[in-house]
Amino acid sequence: MVSRYKDPLQATQFNEQWARTLQQLNGLWLQPLTLTTDWGQARVWIHTPQRRVYETLVFLPGFNASSLVWLIGQGMTSLSKNYRLCLVDINGQPGFSEGVSPKAGTDEYGHWARQVLEQLGTNRATLIGHALGALISLKACRLAPQFVKKVVLVNPAGLQSLSLSTALLRFYLLALRGPSYASVQAFLREVVFSPLDPPLPLAQEKLLIDFQLYTLGSFALAPGGARRSPTRS
């Protein structure tokens, strides 16, 4: 099984426009880089600071998300002055990477991460992963330790339980079963984000909601995929 957009041409147009608008609002422009993995092409968005000495930060998003969601807010702008930023779209997830998904219950995500890190041209990087991205970061530590300096785990999948309290469950169900601008906004505000100071700019919040609505309606997500003919590296 392979994750795919129902209308690939429309999805490309939406994602390209969404990416341009988000970078413009954030004031930070990244260069797209396409890498080759055993699971198809993977897109990485890269910003390199002007200073000659810098460290590399590799950002991995959560389940059903584009790596560019890391641009929501202003945290990346300050990091961009001193760090090389690499935002990786995970294969099999929404965004610009291809749809064959590594199998979560195996070492495939670790091998995928190793192939990505090898091609980024850095000796040791700090991995910052959210949810699924955190799980991949841990697998990279085990299977590609030579490329990892340290990891930062945000809501790590498999280590932190998903809250299913009655108060929060209704937001999950509304967002998944009856997706609308209001239900996704409530889900983000009540379940995903803690209160921010300063608050998230409304224009960026709207872009995040637009992405989630489009993905929920247009992206057929497979939980795992058949692997392409591997070219072990």
Image (cartoon, grey):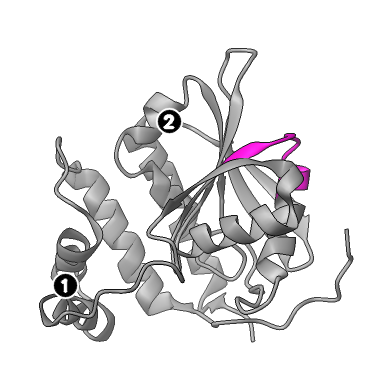
Callout 2, which amino acid?
A: Leu
**Alpha-carbon neighbours of circle 1 within 10 Å: few (<14), some, or many (≥20)?**
many
Q: Quadrant of residue 149?
A: top right
Q: Quadrant of residue 176?
A: bottom left
Question: How far from the left and from the top, in percent, is residue 95?
Answer: 52, 60
Asked if residue 123 lies in the magenta stretch, the reply is yes
Q: Residue at x 70, y 49 (%)?
A: 34
> Disc 2 and disc 1: Cα gap in Å?
29 Å
Question: Which residues lie in the magenta part?
Answer: 117-126
Instruction: Say which label, 2 or 1, has the lower sequence index.
Output: 2
Residue 1 in the figure: left or right of residue 94: right
Residue 152 in the figure: left or right of residue 174: right
On-image quarter of the N terminus:
bottom right
The residue closer to the viewer here, 27 or 113, is 113
- Residue 104 vertical position relative to residue 77 in the rendered view, above or below: below
Q: Which residue is mark 1?
A: 183
Q: Residue at x 40, y 70 (%)?
A: 215
Question: How far from the left and from the top, in percent, is residue 203?
Answer: 22, 45
Question: Hey, which residue is sitting farthest left in the picture?
Answer: 167
Tag 2's secondary structure? loop
Callout 1, which amino acid?
A: Ser
Q: Which residue is mark 2?
A: 28
